[in-house]
Image (cartoon, rainbow, N blue to C red):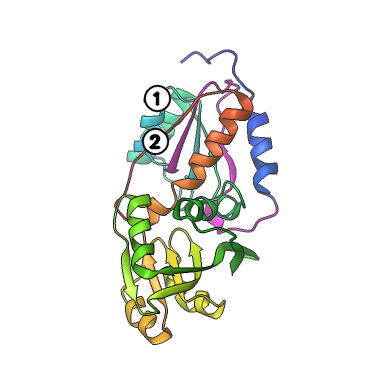
Amino acid sequence: MVPRRGGVSLEGIAAYCDRLLRTSEILDWEGAVNGLQVGNGGRGVTRIAAAVDASLATVRLAMDAGADLLLVHHGLFWSPSHPWTGRKYELIQALVESRLAVYSSHLPLDLHPKLGNNAGLCRALGLRGGKPFFREKGSDIGLRVGVAIDRGELVARMTRVLGRAPILLPGGPMKCRRIGVVTGGAGAEVRKAVREGVDTFITGEGPHWTYALAEELGVNVLYGGHYATETFGVKSLAAHLSRRYRVPWSFIDHPTGL
């Protein structure tokens, strides 16, 4: 495939994202590999696609959308990246032949005060004035909000915002006053959230045993879905870059149901 001429420098966009998200400052799990994961052979960026996960399916959808750059929250390297056979080969072949670049941001995008997943979910739920909380890898990756809201109303808001009813573990008070939000898969850390002073904990998913733990600790837990709670960051980042660099963007919706 002949490289597309013109467009915005991929290296310039990646460097800007690294500064904006403080990529080099924020520790993460080893497989996150935050930053530019795949180059594009000098091709300019004329269209951006955003997706929660980097996979063969989302790469193909980004190609169909005519994108030169795919922004993702969950990148390519969580599991062993070799051998290059089967579906792994198809993924690498698609990236190389289409010259589709991939930029990934995990915890740096979770915790960004304006563009992050937690900030976006809080805004959508009408929860204002969030303060950093939930220490992980040396950073406060979540937000804690002081507010008085009926538990049923909070469930209703999450249903409207996420397009699905959350799973409710009703171990806490009917009136929620100290709400903690950590998008994604923080359900196994309910005890940590309670230690940091919340009576209601919103996250994406968690294990079966947290139901009894929520009752024991006297806390409400709402599981909104790992995928559903983490669409906010990549959308916000793509929209921000679109405005800054005057390139169009689109969201690649490939829900997992989890």
- Percent across and percent down for residue 241 are 59, 32
Q: Is residue 220 above or below residue 229?
A: below
Label 1 close to label 2 by CB (< 8 Å): yes
| Magenta extent | 25-53
Location of mark 2 (residue): 252
Q: Is residue 28 magenta?
A: yes
Q: Would you place residue 223 above or below residue 73 in this image?
A: below
Q: Is residue 48 left or right of residue 94?
A: right
Q: Nearer the viewer, residue 88 or 13?
A: 13
Q: Is residue 112 above or below residue 104?
A: below
> Residues under labels 1 and 2: Cα distance?
9 Å
Chain-order first, disc 1 or disc 2: 1
Asked whether 189 falls inside the magenta stretch, the response is: no
Q: Is any part of residue 85 visible from this angle?
A: no
Number of the label disc, if any, that sits on residue 243: none
Per the rendering, the mark at residue 65 is 1
Mark 1 crowd level (few <14, some 14–19, many ≥20, 10 Å Cα): some
Residue type, numbered disc 2 = Ile
**Element under disc 2:** loop
